[in-house]
Amino acid sequence: MEKFNQKQSCPYSNAMELIGGKWKILIIGRIYENKKIRFNELKKTVTNISSQVLVRKLDEMRKDGLVVKIINKSQNVEYKLSEFGNSAIPIISALKKWSLGRKKEISKIVQLTK
């Protein structure tokens, strides 16, 4: 009998594995807002992220099928969301709406934990 794997059966864990962490939701949101975005522009809009971390996160998200890397004729690299990545937008938008609606409460909590 196959050993029960809780992680595989937990939809919350599975979703957080793909889009969780400090940067991924923010990166997805910024790409979505811009439709397509070049690496340097993305780095400017995702503040306080190092180039190395951004490269690593984009690579992870590309391997997971969330992001598509496009190399133009002029060798410029752009990123856009895949169809799968776009399917996460309603969730990310709801999170943003909740955060904006609870801005005072969240700000107090975030300030206390810093």
Image: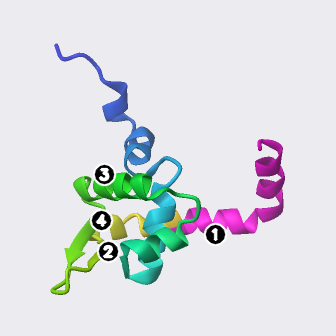
Q: Which amino acid does label 3 sit on?
A: Glu
Front residue of this view, candidates 76 and 79: 76
The residue under label 3 is 60
| Residue 91 visible in image | no
Residue 89 found in image quarter:
bottom left
Please tell me how crowded label 2 is: few (under 14), some (14-19), or many (20+) other residues with Cα within 10 Å.
many
Q: Who comes first in sequence, dot 3 or dot 4?
A: 3
Amino acid type for the residue under numbered disc 4? Val
**Foreground pick, 32 / 5:** 32
Secondary-structure class at tag 3: helix
Magenta span includes 94: yes
- Residue range of the region highlighted in magenta in the rendering: 93-114
Q: Which of labels 1 and 2 is toward the front?
A: 2
Q: Which image quarter is the C terminus in?
A: top right
Q: Mark 4 points at which residue?
A: 67
Q: How crowded is mark 1: few (under 14 residues within 10 Å), some or many (20 or more)?
A: few
* Residue located 81% across and 50% down the image: 111
Residue annotated with mark 1: 97
- The local secondary structure at tag 4 comes to strand
